[in-house]
Image (spheres, helix red, strand yellow):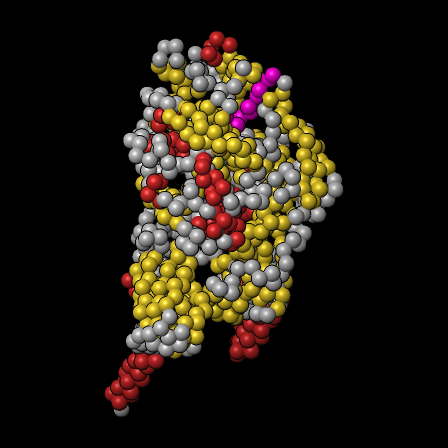
Amino acid sequence: MRKVVNRALIFILAMALIIPLVLVRGETVKADTKKGVTVKATVGFNDKYKIGYYTPINISIKNDYKDIQGTVEVKVPTSENKYDSYLKNISLQKGAEKVVTINVPVKQAFLKYEISIKDGNDEVYSEEIKVGNSTNQTVKFIGILSDDFDSLTYLNKIPAPKGVTLSTELIKLDENKFPDYLQVLQSFDIIVINNFDSSKLSKEAYENLKSWVKLGGTLVIGTGTNYNKTLSLFKDDFIKGQPGELTKVNTNKIYNIATNGDNNNSVSLENLNIQLDRSNTNIQEGNFKLLQTVSIGSGNVAIAGFDFGLKPFVGWANNSSFGEKIFGMINPSFINSAKFDNSYMNTYFSVSELVNNLMTKKANINMYLLVLIIYIVLVAPISYFVLKKLDKRELMWITVPCIAIVFGVVVYFLGSGTRLNTVVANNANIINMDSKGAATKNTYVGIFTPKKMSVEVASKEGQKLESVDNPNYNGNPDNAKKNELDTLIREDKGTLEFKNKSVLATRTVKIPSSNISIGKIDSDVSIDGDDIKGTIKNSTSYDFEYCYVITPKSYYILGAVKKGDSVNIDKKTGDYNGDINQLTYENKIYKIGSPNASDEDRYNASLFRMSYSESMQTTRIKDISIIAITKDNISKPLVVNGKDSEVKDRTIIRVPLQLNFKNGDTIQYPMGFVNHRVVEMSTTNYDPYGEVFYGAGTPEIVYDIDKNMIVSELKLDSSSTSSNIGTSNAVLEAYDYKQNKYVSVTSSSFNGDDLKKYLNNDNELKIKVSVNNNGGPVQIPDISVKGKVK
């Protein structure tokens, strides 16, 4: 009998293991690919794309099957069993051909994406394509818009800090291939427009181009005899200026720049005399400006008065060197800081932290643990000993369930304050504003639901919503199956559908950048030694709960400022080493490095960091900015499952201050305002994001002091070599141009004749940092200078 029972149990156990294997297939059963539908798919730009960015998949479809009314879909694996669907509708008659472009993220794993074409619900085509392990982030993309692409192929080098090796890919663009999606455009480091009718670009492409520049892109425009074509797009105030006359200019500057002064041959150029507002002149011959640069947002726009695709540049042996040199003039950060790529994967984790930190309804874990401990103690030892003493141990079967019910009610009411009753959209708004009040708003949204559910999200204004995609593939890439839909991205509608995500999962959305009018922040601020003084007025439509002024070396906490009110800047709150991390993690503005950090500090610190990191600048702060945070609602609700979501806004406004460093014939640059560049890496490792050296070695730094000043006083701040980011880990030496050798730095101040020997004819100061091998990082020191106008 026992054997029969054992066999029955074994049979039941075997069936329990087999039935799930029968019911749950390892792969999705796909419809047979129908004959008559021919598809050719290309990934990126001529198979060139970057990991961590979005890239276009161009799907060329020839339909010899039947009339198709359906969808084209690209399935992107997100984990071993799930995928995101990027979808567009298609209408294609029999015998017709069409190219459909779908923009998808390139993840860090080598994966098989899937292209699927459906006629209604009937799949008529399905094929896998391999995406990933392509161009890494040491390769730079230069996009060329030109009717004569071959004449510009010499523009194939982007400068880099010494010790950093880069390669460059030239991407041929036109009005059809120009990215219509900002996240695709952000894979480009430079875009050149030359001898091209720029008005052919669509309105959407132009808006993306402007946003790309503001976020740190470098746009180079050649004019000359073709200036009417090249400048035809720029009819708004994005670039403010007035074209003049074409003039033949003889100059030796072209050869001089390309050969580092070794060759001063003169060449003749057809140059457009164009007057640009707030431009810096890079190359000038007499009264003629050959190359000018305008800073817009975090990016740069350069306009050359000549055509890059004509002689003397075409066929010239030094043309590639000339292109590399002018790229460095236009955007010095290529050389000075090896600026980080602005890929979506660099912002994903910051955005996730940001929207999660803004979630106000959170469970008090400590309280739950306390209740759980009390429950365990009551339900077991106390209950047992009390009943034992009363000689009523048989009542345990009643007391234990009763205690469980009581504590269940307690836990329910404890959690009632953390439960959502409706769908909530936590909006983190980042507004970049100039002194005149022109502002651009980026919004990141975390959508939270009261229960596990599918969520369809749309914009009330019809904006195309963007999914903030996780750059990592969670699982074994070799076992990537696409069985369960995670998120549906309808590219042509601009809507997102999150499928059955857990109540704990964050659904993260980005609303595209938009211009916003909220008034302005007025300021009357001037430099007073190494400090600043003045007044700030809140002339916006909103109250500021918090207001700060941040400089490269100090910070000013100004408190709350109601709309219409003013606040004086008269005394700095404190100093720091110039690194954002110290302001947010240490006991400065925020204390999120402390285990007892408040939620309010976490919210605001996340916003603060994001307002700087959006443009992917280094963590070293290089400018003076007004930072204001408001809790007033600025955003309109999203439409979630057909209804308006509840909106909870937190907004940070950042306004860089343009200060005049001249006062009469006196010039003064405080700490952090003198540009520097690393000219020798030695054997150290260099982190350009934090401007920090690691490991033993003797790197060299050159400081480019204003050439139009006679320096009378110079101060060197070496505190960063022994600050909280590192230990006392370096010895500083300055180059003595009279002795032609490095000498020990025995003082932090230099003036008079002692100073002159450390500056060359170009007002350059050269410092060597001898880094010890004790593991501590060393940050590049800052300098301040004071002097007279030459």
Task: Using the image as rendered, state which of residue 330 and residue 703 is in the foreground.
Answer: 330
* Screen quadrant of the N terminus: bottom left
- Which residue lies at the image location 44% right of the left edge and 48% below the top edge? 186
Side (left or right) of 386 relative to 144: right
* Number of disc labels: 0
Q: Magenta: predominant secondary structure element? A: loop
Highlighted magenta segment, given as a residue range: 665-674
Residue 470: x and y in percent read: 43, 56
Q: Is residue 436 above or below residue 67?
A: above
Identify which residue, 467 or 714, lies in the foreground. Answer: 467
Q: Position of residue 152 (x, y in %)?
A: 35, 40
The quadrant in which residue 268 appears is top left
Name the residue rendered at 58%, 51% in the picture.
514
* Residue in the picture at 48% in, 59% down: 467
Viewer-proximal residue, 121 or 628?
A: 121
Q: In this picture, is 339 found above or below 41?
A: above
